[in-house]
Image: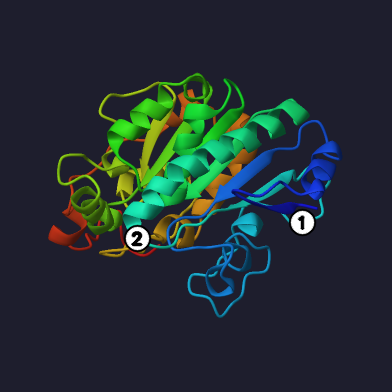
Amino acid sequence: MPVVRVDAGKAAPQSLWDATDAMTDAAPIVVMIHGYRYSPSRPSHDPHRHILSLSPDQSCRRALSWPRALGFGTGAADEGLAVAFGWEARGTLGGAYRRAEDTGRALADLVDRLSDRTGRPVALIGHSLGGRVALQSLRFAPAGSVGRVCLLTAAEFRDQAAQALDSPAGHRAEVLNITSRENDLFDFAMELWLGRGRRQALGFGLDHPARNWIDVQIDDGPTLDMLAQMGFPVERNPLRLSHWTPYLRGGLFDFYRTALKQPWALPMPVLRARLPGRIAPRWSRLLDGLPEQGLARG
């Protein structure tokens, strides 16, 4: 069973523990966490019928299967286990943001049990408020239980991310912060509505560099050039505004899949040495338009 559904606030199904017991020694575990406006209790907004499904409902907007894009569902013995983690992310943005902390606690407990049962760290990938859930889980998870974390335009503030990283699990995890100037309006809105203009969004990276953290700006020409040189050509069609390109743009999931499931193939020192790690100024996508050099359609 390559994909198992687990929802926050509910007991994990026995099928999850059966799947972990059947895993090969080197097989990875990846927990996938959706973002804002999904709800496992509402069929029309159920992430398990959408991005967290092996066969998403094609009538849904932005219906791309994360588990398939991450290499699950192939039938290979060593493909590992994908955990589709659902939580109540509807309602007001402020309410969902606050619930994400409690959801992070629940995820930390699940990660602890998975890591303890299998003897390996668990990888996480989360979009938007799912990135906040992933970071909050670092605050409460045991040291060594979390491996790689991919944050896809995470809806979180820099100070909260720094607190999460300054934890036993955070010290030993490795974080890839996927950012884009296409997300500027969403970051700015979060700063105004939730931060009252006094806190800065994580789209700018951390306030202070960390050895186990790297920013990857996916609408930056030199970054895309280097990803292509490393064997991960990415579609080059940046939009002026988009919150969803970190998982909809062609080629990016090839990078995420390798980074999460084969971290030894992309060690952090290599990523830090080869990727620019820089972040362009806010509104540069809107103010400069769509520059031809390095950002034309590939």
Left or right placement of residue 67 versus residue 165 in this view = right
Closer to the camera, 46 or 212?
A: 46
Quarter of image, res 215: top left
Q: Secondary structure at mark 1?
A: loop
Q: Which numbered tag is attached to residue 74?
A: 1
Identity, as a three-letter code, of the amino acid under mark 2: Thr
**Which residue in the protein does label 2 denote?**
92
Q: Name which residue lies at 52% across and 69% down.
A: 45
4 up-or-down from 144: above or below: below
Identity, as a three-letter code, of the amino acid under mark 1: Thr
Tell me the CA gap for discs 2 and 1: 38 Å
Closer to the camera, 107 or 231?
A: 107
Closer to the camera, 233 or 186?
A: 186
Judge whether residue 45 can be spotted in this image: yes
Q: In what quadrant of the picture does the C terminus appear?
A: bottom left
Q: Earlier in the sequence, mark 2 or mark 1?
A: 1
